Amino acid sequence: MDEPLNPPPRLAAHREAAPLLRVLRIAKRLIIFAVTMLILAAVSFAGLLLYLRVQPMPPVSFTQSTELLDVHGSLIDSFHGGQNRHIVTLDDIAPDMLKATLAIEDKRFYRHFGIDPRGLGRAIWTNLRTLDPNGQGASTLTQQLARNLFLTHEKTWTRKIKEAMYALQLEMAYTKDEILAMYLNQIYFGHGAYGIEAASELYFGKSASELSLSEASMLAGVMKSWKYYSPHMDYERSRARQKLVLTTMAEQGVITDAQATAAYAVPLNLQPLTEKESSKAPYFRDYVRSVAVGELGIDERLYDSGGLRIFTTLDLHAQANAEAAVAKYLEPHEELQAALVSIDPRTGHIQAMVGGRNYEENQYNRAFATTRQPGSSFKPILYLTALQQEGFTAVTRFMSEPTVFTYDEGRKTYSPKNYNNKYPNKLVDLRYAISKSDNIYAVNTIMQVGPDKVIDTARSLGITSEMEPLPSLALGTYPVSPYEMASAFATIAGGGVRREPTAILRIEDMYGRVLYEAKPREEQVVAPQYTYILTHLMQSVFDDGGTGRRVSDLLKRPVAGKTGTTNTDAWMVGFTPELATAVWIGYDKGRSVSTIEAHTASPIFAEFTEKTLSAVPPKLFEVPEGVTTVYIDPATGLLATADCPNPRLESFIAGTEPTEACAGHGAEPLPAQEGAPHQDQERNWWDDLKRWWNS
């Protein structure tokens, strides 16, 4: 028999090793494939980064609240185009807030490149298993920022891919600290609050830099979803979320367990949600916007939501007094409207502005209405013109009686009437004419000096409304605005220096850079001697028998002013050394004002003036050089003697005072008093000071 054939030992060993060799070859190929794929992935990723680097990213910008501030830096109003946001730096955020945010939102934030591979891999595996793109999420803080800045919140694969791409671009364009700051300034905390600063103010009434660990952990919890975790929506759920944040911080070693327990035990002083208060000065706010956008060229979008800080001249104390006075005296008179403008004559700063009785019902700003006749309140401008003419002084006299005036070279006539057709039928002087508002005297004056010169004076004082050179101009028949009247009287109060009315002092952008700074013009348009003499005369309006006598008891300081009344308008315009104010009363639709309604202008003026200056001692109007005062006899306008029954100290430009003594009383003239105020003013000032001290 043949013996069985056996393979050679080498061949048998080869056969035994074959399976192992196949495994090794497969392993080798897999390794080569894996390395190749890794290289391709690395190259692809590098190429992707390079591509993303050169691709333009949507601009990163936040709308934030623009603030309107008064002259003392107090907030008048803020507006934000629908988003209440105040941008802050990381240095302006409490460290505990930063720690809490990173602990609960992205603990590996400073170690990843915008996408966290660990979390991403876990989320992808879970979502692929369930085939649900809405399943587990793994968004880093950077991805959340990218989504909130550039994308919608729809849960789709396309959006998630875009989110990752934008996150990578953000990481390449900004530092980690910059991304964290953007995130905290962008995130929505509910109830209209965007960003950590607005949220801190909303929930706790404090700045983000002042947040405690307890408060910071609460806000960090709200970030996930304000609808679920806002303490104003569900307090118990928000507390549970706060506890989770504190526990997570302790587990990560950011704080100790004891600190977490103590922070959770601290009672939260939550601020109640309130509706946004209406602006403290809505008419002024609208005016400031019109100036900033229309005159200064500030872009509307920047103004509305660019985080500007607009420093204005408004004084909220004065504004509150103005609004209160208007509301008080208009309350009994339904539909009666009012306007008030007050200017500091020393600076031209607009300190208060009211454009109507109720801004919510009607936003029309009557402070700038050029459809209202000023009536007799215009007369001081006429008399200021006259005082600058040779031969016209405080004792210039005209006959006050029914008079027909001829003008236009005799072709036309004008027949003015005094109020209630009352005429003294005798010669009266300028002090009498101002205090009693004598119309015949006013028209005599304009006929003597010429209406063209009166218009020139009005223009120099800041009145730009249309006027015609007619005799009726003397009685204020051409409409002007309360703003113009306040501006003109501020020039008189300021010693003839025309200071351009100013509402905006400075505008800064969100970084504190000055975009605009006011440099108002000043010009001496009238010599101070003339404005002082006019001021001296206008104080008689509040004396017994004057048209402003009804409010004399309300005034505790020297005040110069002038009333004005037409069928449809009532005015009180006046000033102290610190404040020039115009008050208008009337109806929007041309309806006539009654006598009782007309009398509301003066008390509004008086109450506003006194309350606004309540902390300021009464002050005399400064007497400039070149003014002299002498005793005159009111009956004759001549120098008074010791035997004259009613001598009166009157002011004159030095050299224009009377030199002839009253002949009817046979004695030496009383001595002149260089630069001194008249006797009544001196006595009233002392009485005013005592009344102010005791008030």
Image (cartoon, rainbow, N blue to C red):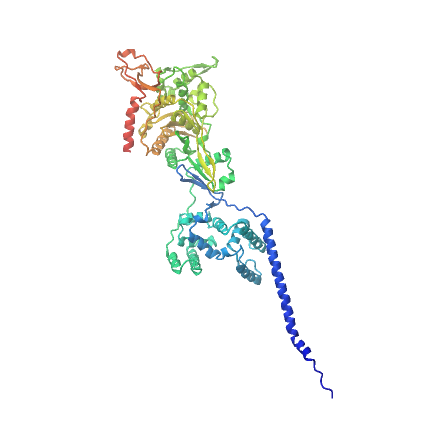
The vertical placement of 600 against 405, above or below, is: below
**Residue farthest toward the front in the current orientation of the protein:** 10
Residue 462 x %, y %: 45, 26
Q: Which quarter of the figure is the C terminus placed in? A: top left
Q: Position of residue 31 (x, y in %)?
A: 62, 65
In the depicted structure, whether residue 280 falls above or below residue 150: above
Q: Position of residue 70 (x, y in %)?
A: 41, 37
Give the quadrant of residue 492.
top left
Q: Nearer the viewer, residue 339 or 534?
A: 534
Q: Residue at x 49, y 39 (%)?
A: 303
Question: From what the image shows, is residue 325 above or below residue 231?
Answer: above
> Count the marks: how many?
0
Residue 122, position as x, y percentages in the image: 54, 61
Observer-nearest of 68 and 235: 68
Horizontally, residue 19 falls left or right of residue 604, namely right
Residue 297 makes an appearance in the image: yes
Residue 231 visible in the picture: no
